[in-house]
Image: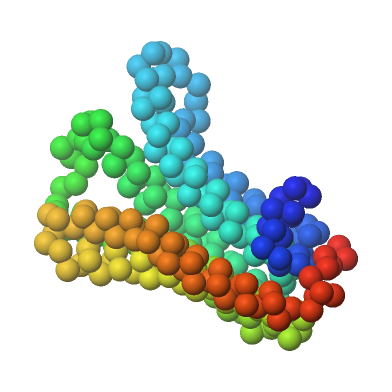
């Protein structure tokens, strides 16, 4: 656990929530339940055909697993950085957990469909109407956007309490950096919804290409934010860089 804390704090942010709380425990239970919803199979294969199907479903499971772990890591990092358990944080956290549970099935369905397209095993009865493709992309984009809007809201709420938390200039800058990073990802999800709505129904699946903008956004945001962080670090007093006592 200490190694995880050290990794989170490597940007110079002092951790205020290193102890486990009831909010952390409840959230981990929800994330664990979400992971069980994407398992390849609940039963041990009894024939090779069943085993083959499990192996084919491994890639969609792996991709879904990676996304959920990325969301869990963002959640873990936030609560370790701030240790907030005020009413606003709890409400936003509940909205995030609800979104994660809702998002699991659209996520697994979409990655399974994409994997099937690469292997050429897409059944003719997956979609009965072109409008269903548009609806799928809108649902996926909305779920992705809602997830990262929740993270952005968490960081904005933490920034609002910067005086009470006694955030240093570096920590205040980093808090806004994390806010804009997640806000940008949420906007990409909304862009996917918009493009899916504007494209012809049969072409709506191409809205998924919007998610390639994630790499572009992270590159631009990382370049700009790193310069701001260096300037903020220069304004931070030495005593405000020392690790906080665990609590």
Horizontally, residue 86 falls left or right of residue 216, namely right
Q: Horizontal and vertical percent for residue 53?
A: 36, 24
Is residue 3 depicted above or below 218 in this figure? Answer: above
Picture mark count = 0
Query: What residue is rendered at 49% in x and 55% in y?
Result: 101
Question: Which of the two residues, 56 or 45, is positioned nearer the viewer here?
Answer: 56
Q: Is residue 238 above or below residue 62?
A: below
Residue 144: image x %, image y %? 41, 61
The quarter of the displayed image where residue 112 is located: top left
Q: Residue at x 48, y 49 (%)?
A: 67
Viewer-proximal residue among 158 and 26: 158
Where in the figure is residue 190, as x and y percent of width and height?
Answer: 34, 69
Horizontally, residue 43 falls left or right of residue 15, namely left
| Residue 74 in view (yes/no) | yes
| Position of residue 39 in the picture relative to residue 113 (left or right) | right
Left of 152 or right of it: where is 175?
A: right
Q: Quadrant of residue 210?
A: bottom left
Q: Nearer the viewer, residue 235 or 175?
A: 235
Residue 143 seen in the figure? no
Quadrant into which the C terminus falls? bottom right
């Amino acid at each position: 656990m200490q190694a995880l804390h050290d990794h989170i704090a490597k940007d110079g942010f002092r951790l205020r929530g290193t102890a486990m709380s009831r909010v952390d425990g409840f959230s981990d239970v929800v994330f664990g339940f979400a992971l069980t919803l994407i398992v390849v199979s609940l039963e041990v294969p009894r024939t090779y055909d069943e085993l083959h199907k499990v192996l084919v479903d491994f890639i969609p499971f792996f991709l879904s697993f990676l996304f959920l772990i990325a969301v869990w890591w963002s959640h873990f990092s936030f609560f370790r950085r701030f240790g907030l358990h005020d009413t606003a944080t709890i409400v936003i956290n509940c909205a995030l957990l609800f979104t994660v549970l809702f998002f699991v099935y659209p996520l697994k369905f979409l990655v399974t469909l994409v994997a099937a397209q690469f292997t050429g095993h897409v059944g003719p009865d997956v979609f009965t109407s072109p409008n269903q493709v548009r609806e799928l992309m809108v649902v996926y984009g909305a779920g992705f956007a809602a997830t990262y809007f929740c993270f952005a809201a968490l960081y904005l709420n933490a920034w609002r309490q910067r005086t009470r938390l006694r955030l240093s200039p570096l920590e205040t800058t980093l808090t806004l950096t994390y806010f804009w990073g997640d806000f940008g990802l949420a906007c990409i999800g909304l862009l996917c919804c918009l493009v899916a709505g504007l494209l012809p129904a049969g072409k709506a699946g191409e809205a998924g290409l919007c998610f390639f903008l994630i790499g572009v956004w992270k590159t631009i945001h990382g370049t700009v934010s790193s310069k701001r962080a260096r300037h903020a670090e220069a304004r931070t007093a030495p005593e405000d860089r020392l690790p906080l006592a665990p609590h």
